[in-house]
Amino acid sequence: MNSNPVRVLVVDDEAAIREMIQFSLRRSGMEVEGAADAREALAAVSEHKPDIILMDWMMPGVSGLELTRRLRREPVTSDIPIIMLTAKVTEDDKVAGLEAGTDDYVIKPFSPRELIARIHAVLRRSSPTDEHGLIEAGELTLDTHARRVVAKEGEVRVGPTEYRLLEFFMSNSGRAYSRSQLLDHVWGTGAYLEERTVDVHIRRLRKALQAAGLSHYVQTVRGHGYRFMADG
């Protein structure tokens, strides 16, 4: 993470809880904005993208779970870490939240100290580069400063587009992306390319990784797109 204050969006329909969270986070040096419902949250996100969202599960109208799904579907907001604030603790609830794209849970009631610790933990996981600009996943290391990819056997030669694709995958390991989402994230929202362009570069990336025996890291998600999943 950079040295700028962490920007947090708190989405909760209960004003007292929302204001308590905002007060505690501001005292810890974070920039905080509040939203009482999905409409206000979407407006806040479009105006200034937050570093992380704290989302109440139970809200009237559009629930926190449905709002999370909406944010995950949009390329611009799909990578924002989301912590769900909830009194729900059943296994089915947790599975539903994880499938919707939630990064972590904080169970009500919670202390400000616990919440701040969870925020920092999620942001550390969501910021894949270390202080040397390295991203590590399984047997692969990507050097963002030198723009090199290294495996145990040595350097993996990849083209510039395959490098950007691999950097995005390694920064978002385990999450599945559609071809259109990959086009937006890797090529940019202004790129008017056919979705099969993604398939071409996926094949090239797998071929490059095959020399190191790591082509299986790039997985096909049937009916959806692709994801990156490293061993162990």
Image (tube, grey):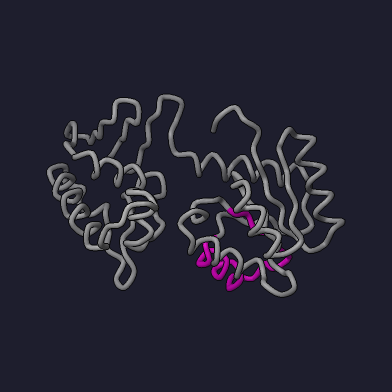
In front of the other: 115 or 163: 163
Residue 145: x and y in percent read: 34, 26
Q: Residue at x 62, y 30 (%)?
A: 4
Residue 147: x and y in percent read: 28, 30
**Count of number-bearing discs:** 0
Is the residue 73 above or below the residue 206 in the image? below
State the image quarter where residue 163 is shown.
Answer: top left
Residue 77: x and y in percent read: 52, 54
Q: What's drawn in magenta, residue-wise?
A: 82-101
In what quadrant of the picture does the N terminus appear? Answer: top right
Q: In this view, does 36 lie to the left or right of 201?
A: right
Q: In this view, does 52 lie to the left or right of 166?
A: right
In front of the other: 38 or 206: 38
Q: Which residue is drawn at 40% across and 44% down?
A: 171
Residue 173: x and y in percent read: 39, 50
Residue 99 falls within the magenta-colored stretch: yes
Is the residue 22 above or below the residue 141 in the image? below
Residue 180 falls within the magenta-colored stretch: no
Q: Residue at x 59, y 44 (%)?
A: 51
State the image quarter where residue 36 is shown.
Answer: bottom right
State the image quarter where residue 196 is shown.
Answer: bottom left
Residue at the outermost right position: 16
